[in-house]
Image (cartoon, rainbow, N blue to C red):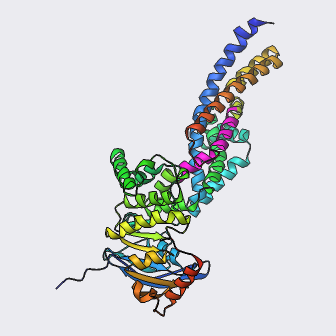
Amino acid sequence: MTVQKPPILRVENICKALGGKEILKSVSFSLNKGELKVLIGPSGAGKSTLLQCINFLIPPDKGHVWLEGVEVQSRRKRDLYAFRQQVGMIFQDFNLFDHLNALENVAIALRKVKKMHRPEARDRAVAELEQVGLGDKKHLYPAELSGGQKQRVSIARALAMDPKIMLLDEPTSALDPELIGEVLSVIRDLARGGMTMILATHQIGFTRSLADEVLFMEHGIIIEQGSPEELLSPKACTRSRDFCSRLNDLYTENE
Amino acid sequence: MDTAFYSTQLIPALNRGLVMSVKLIIPSGLIGLMLGIVIGTLRTFGHPFIRKAANAYATVFRGTPLVVQLFLLYFGLPNLGIYLDAYTAAVFGFILCSGAYHSEYIRGGLLSIKKGQLLAAQAMGFSMFKTMSSIIVPQALRRALPGCGNEIIYLIKYSSLAYIITCIELTGEGKIIATRTFRYTEVFLVIGFYYLVLVTIASFILQKLEEKFKIPGFGKA
């Protein structure tokens, strides 16, 4: 008999109102080790807010978050900072540190947060950049990189912290169509390597091929939840399916 | 031309004054800038209560004449049992005044940094202090540097007010000679030239600093 392991991340009853408008209305889900869950839904559904509530960049009004069975005490600064180190985040618009080159972007948190020595942090940063195929671009500044390269640096930066889970907030939405592929391929490698991830995206093809589960969000709640086949197959009669076929009409995906 | 007047009286006195001016300007400039960085950051990202206090400081020191501040430090503080010598009072006054002005330039720089920079740092577990010191302030400083340089150039010139509270620097030494010899035009022309040289050197250093901290993507290519 196998012992049921607790989920690596459990999010329960997250509520958030911003400017008097309820953005999240009691959202709950959990994530097992090695799973990739994809968050889809129309813009304004609350996907970004949900992801930022998970690591308390936006403090939720209500709700609880557990990492490996331990509830995160977001009010205790030390606990919060320790928790965030274990949760990598990728943003839609990259948010690379503009004053640092690619290498320093990856190394700075290792030095300042993980207190690594400079040479050690440097070596680790170089290794992470090589992992995302940017070993030769390490001395370039964000302004000198393409969108796809910037997003790969930001993935390297998150991975250098050895996160237990990754939150990816529409990582390809700000990219030119011809640059989406290089970022998706890095994410695909991560998924195959067993990284636990929650990914907000509009890349339906990618979702179909890699997601363990799809969460469809609208108006601040998860209204549908299931495997990609259940929700997105042509025969499925779901809100998700409906939304995705409309997306497909709008964009021709480059997969 | 009466070269003896210049070589035996004016130039030695002004050089003596110049040394004192430099002794006033360098600590005031450096500490004033550091104070401005701290105050500017608190005014932008501080706890609301601290923010109010920092704003109040900036309002008072930007809102009152420097001469008034110097008089209060030198002649007013003894009423509270605090005795500062003229040099210390002058440096304190300059630091507090230039810190208030610097804080405004720094604040402008900080407000221009996109929120994503803050989010990215915090998402990796940076504390608020480290987010500021490693990510936000270094970027804001680059944008504030031209303004801060302006303030340092002002400081070089308003350091001449030190002589009013008996800290005899460049202007003070010159004024003594001018009063004694009644050769105001010559004396103040030479003093003006001294300041021009000081400001030129400061501008040169500031320009080198801007070049040193230049980063692709900030300003023109």
In the displayed orientation, state which residue is furthest to the left: A1
Q: Can residue B83 be seen at all in this image of the molecule?
A: no
The image quarter in which residue B190 lies: top right
Reply yes or no: does residue B168 show up in magenta.
no
Image quarter of the N terminus of chain A: bottom left
Residue drawn at (40%, 83%) of the image: A29
Of the pair B10 and B36, the residue shown nearer to us: B36
Give percent across and percent down for residue B100. 65, 47
Give percent across and percent down for residue A17. 56, 80
Reply yes or no: does residue B139 show up in magenta.
yes
Segment tinted magenta in the rendering? B136-156
Q: Is residue B15 left or right of residue A51?
A: right
Give percent across and percent down for residue A60. 49, 77
Residue drawn at (62%, 77%) of the image: A19
Number of numbered discs present?
0
Name the magenta segment's main secondary structure: helix
Of the pair A10 and A141, the residue shown nearer to us: A141
Judge whether B59 appears above or below A78 on screen. Answer: above
Of the pair A204 and B60, the residue shown nearer to us: A204
Judge whether B10 appears above or below A105 on screen. Answer: above
Residue drawn at (67%, 46%) of the image: B101
Give percent across and percent down for residue B72. 68, 41
Q: Is residue A138 left or right of residue B41?
A: left
Judge whether A247 appears above or below B68 on screen. Answer: below
Q: Is residue A97 left or right of residue A111?
A: right
The image quarter in which residue B156 lies: top right
Q: Can residue A163 be seen at all in this image of the molecule?
A: yes
